[in-house]
Image: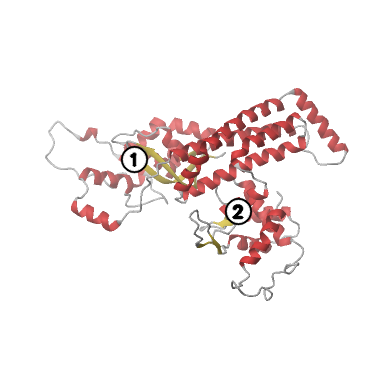
């Protein structure tokens, strides 16, 4: 990544922001015309900061948007920059995680120019509960700009450039061009998801209404081009030319992609690009399908008045208690077994016929057992393929969306809260995803929840 153009283009803008000059006053008293900035002139701290951003960016896909421990960050930087101490890394991380408010004038379509501000200037985000870090939105944007990220609407052109480089045997350009495509998709997808999670759905919808069809056409065209590029990479003639190029680079003492495995690496890059294109197409479709009438904040005064005037029906009240109301917790998050046998619906005496017993009433704990018995094998099969998110599990219809849907939903979530139910000898861990997700169904309504991801790790 080429960071210097990005930094150079913003240095004087920050100087002007910090000038503290009142409009209409002489500018000579403000030291804006110095040609040498203060501080150490060895570039060390800038180099450490950029290395932190690049390292966190490299690890993003691996940790599924999660945090990287501070120990890992410090060890990685000490390997990349000789003589760096832990305190040096802590100093830079402290600076990168501290927001600094900037003020600006918004240029509105009606001609007005209101003054606004933002504190979303920290490049790295620190976990609130541990010494762990990940890129903040501003950090992702900076990394994307430094990687020459282009407009997503022109991605088909980037794919054509990649195909041309492969056909022309310009092997040194292939990885660079592939990285550009991946950066375009990843950065734009993360930006859209951040806006959706932040409640700015109207902005996302408006953007896709205006440019969604064009972008979708570009993505489909790019996918077709990349399939052709991948096929061309598989030709024996291309592989032979590549080996000749590697040998020539080695003789000249210049760095190449390596030996033997290098052509396979390029094919994997093309395959990864296709996967990103597929996921982005899904993102476009989901964003266009989002219902604009999202829930408004609940007024608890109005809710209390409504419940006082018309209390819950008894059946609904106890259904809610069984689903969401464990009275004691043995784990950080509720599991169906935490309240098995503790909370039971109140039975009304002498209202049933003698031959009508409670055989048809299914206890929540039994429901939890039955859902494992019915779908446990399917869940384990998916886990052996890779991580399984709660949203994906909901889409698999492992819950019966009828009158028992609430109980089924609680039991399914319970497997994420206590994956040992799938097998005590299995090494299954649960991680928090990156932000909130939405699942909708006509029969149970709209669910908004923090994403959970279940992963089966090697013993």
Marks 1 and 2 sit apart, C-alpha to C-alpha, by 36 Å
- Residue with the mark numbered 2: 139
Q: Position of residue 128 (x, y in %)?
A: 51, 58
For disc 1, the neighbor class at 10 Å (few under 14, some 14 to 19, many from 20) is few
Q: Is residue 120 left or right of residue 315?
A: right
State the SS at label 2: helix
Looking at this view, is 108 or 353 the one in front?
108
Looking at this view, is 43 or 331 the one in front?
43
Q: Position of residue 318 (x, y in %)?
A: 25, 45
Residue name at image x 41 percent, y 40 percent? 439
Q: Position of residue 331 (x, y in %)?
A: 41, 50
- Residue with the mark numbered 1: 445
Residue 173 to residue 10: above or below? above
Residue 300 in sight in this render: yes
Looking at this view, is 184 or 30 the one in front?
30
Q: Which mark is residue 80?
A: none
Whichever of callouts 1 and 2 sits on the residue coming sooner in the sequence is: 2
């Amino acid at each position: 990544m080429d960071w210097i153009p990005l930094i150079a283009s913003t240095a004087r803008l920050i100087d002007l922001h910090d000038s503290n000059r009142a409009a209409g006053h002489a500018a000579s008293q403000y030291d804006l015309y110095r040609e040498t900035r203060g501080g150490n002139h060895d570039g060390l701290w800038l180099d450490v900061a950029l290395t932190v951003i690049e390292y966190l960016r490299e690890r993003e896909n691996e940790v599924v948007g999660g945090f990287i421990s501070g120990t890992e960050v410090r060890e990685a930087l000490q390997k990349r920059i000789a003589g760096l101490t832990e305190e040096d890394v802590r100093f830079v991380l402290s600076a990168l995680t501290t927001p600094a408010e900037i003020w600006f004038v918004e240029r509105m379509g009606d001609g007005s120019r209101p003054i606004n501000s933002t504190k979303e200037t920290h490049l790295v985000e620190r976990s609130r509960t541990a010494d762990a870090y990940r890129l903040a939105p501003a950090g992702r944007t900076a990394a994307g700009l430094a990687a020459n990220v282009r407009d997503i609407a022109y991605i088909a052109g980037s794919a054509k450039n990649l195909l041309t480089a492969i056909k022309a045997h310009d092997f040194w350009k292939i990885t660079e061009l592939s990285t550009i495509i991946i950066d375009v998709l990843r950065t734009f997808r993360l930006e859209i998801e951040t806006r959706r999670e932040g409640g700015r759905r109207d902005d996302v919808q408006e953007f896709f209404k205006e440019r969604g069809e064009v972008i979708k056409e570009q993505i489909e065209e790019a996918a077709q081009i990349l399939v052709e590029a991948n096929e061309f990479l598989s030709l024996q003639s291309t592989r032979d030319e590549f080996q000749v190029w590697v040998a020539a680079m080695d003789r000249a003492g210049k760095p190449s992609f390596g030996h033997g495995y290098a052509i396979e690496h390029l094919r994997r890059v093309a395959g990864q690009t296709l996967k990103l294109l597929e996921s982005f197409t899904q993102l476009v479709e989901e964003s266009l399908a989002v219902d604009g009438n999202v829930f408004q904040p609940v007024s608890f005064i109005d809710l209390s008045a409504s419940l006082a005037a018309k209390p819950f029906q008894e059946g609904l009240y106890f259904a809610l208690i069984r689903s969401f109301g464990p009275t004691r917790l043995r784990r950080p998050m509720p599991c169906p077994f935490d309240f098995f046998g503790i909370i039971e619906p109140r039975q009304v005496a002498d209202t049933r016929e003698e031959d009508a017993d409670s055989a048809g009433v299914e206890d929540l704990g039994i429901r939890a057992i039955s859902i494992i018995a019915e779908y446990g094998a399917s869940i384990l099969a998916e886990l052996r393929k890779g991580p399984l998110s709660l949203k994906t599990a909901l889409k698999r219809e492992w819950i019966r969306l009828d009158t028992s849907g609430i109980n089924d939903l609680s039991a399914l979530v319970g497997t994420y809260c206590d994956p040992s139910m799938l097998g005590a000898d299995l090494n299954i861990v649960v991680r928090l995803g990156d932000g909130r997700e939405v699942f909708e169904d006509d029969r149970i309504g709209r669910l908004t929840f923090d994403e959970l991801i279940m992963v089966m790790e090697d013993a």
